[in-house]
Amino acid sequence: MKKSKFKAMLLAGAVASLMVGTSNQADAAVIAAGPGSFAAGFLTPVSVGTGAAPLTFVNGDIQPHNVIASADFLDKATAKKTAWCKGYAKTKCPVFWSATIGTGGNTPVLGLENLESGKQYAFFCSIHPGMKGTLVGI
């Protein structure tokens, strides 16, 4: 077996085990980046309950990634009170956001309380802008 194929299989297994480990709650949802996601995109669409339902981003790729809402932004008043907005222009703070994580990492996606039920939200990785996905509020 080729070394690159073996690595891809190991990473796929790591993503699967991380997804199981982080989604043991009935309401938990996962956004996953699998091997080669920097070229293929996120494993989506992902449906998540609006409000405080947990959403975890799991990275099984060899590249670091994050999850950033790409077309929906917080209003100025909410952005002023939101920690991750400090790095964005006042009118360009994303509705939801995650920290950047490396291979095998997982992190919560913040901002789910800003989602609307029945709406679709596009997101991307700020390091790999061609890497996209869709989040659906339920």
Image: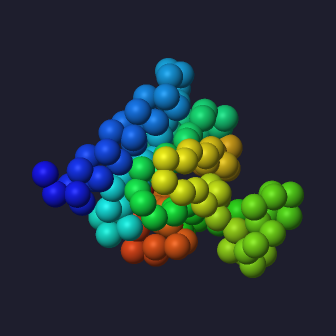
Whole-percent x, y for residue 22 in the image: 52, 32
Residue 127 shows in this picture: yes
Up-down relation of residue 34 to residue 69 (above or below): above
In the orientation shown, which residue stands out farthest toward the bottom? Answer: 89
Up-down relation of residue 49 to residue 93 (above or below): above
Q: Is residue 36 left or right of residue 82?
A: left
Q: Quadrant of residue 112?
A: top right
Q: In front here: 96 or 51?
A: 96
Q: Residue at x 13, y 51 (%)?
A: 1
Q: How is the image coloured?
A: rainbow
Whole-percent x, y for residue 31 in the image: 46, 47
Q: Is residue 108 left or right of residue 80?
A: left
Q: Residue at x 49, y 47 (%)?
A: 104
Q: Residue at x 76, y 66 (%)?
A: 85
Q: In front here: 2 or 30?
A: 2
Q: How many marks?
A: 0
Q: Residue at x 49, y 28 (%)?
A: 21
Whole-percent x, y for residue 32 in the image: 42, 48
Residue 78 shows in this picture: no
Q: Is residue 107 left or right of residue 19?
A: right
Up-down relation of residue 84 to residue 54 (above or below): below
Whole-percent x, y for residue 108 in the image: 62, 44
Q: In front here: 65 or 72?
A: 65
Up-down relation of residue 25 to residue 79 (above or below): above
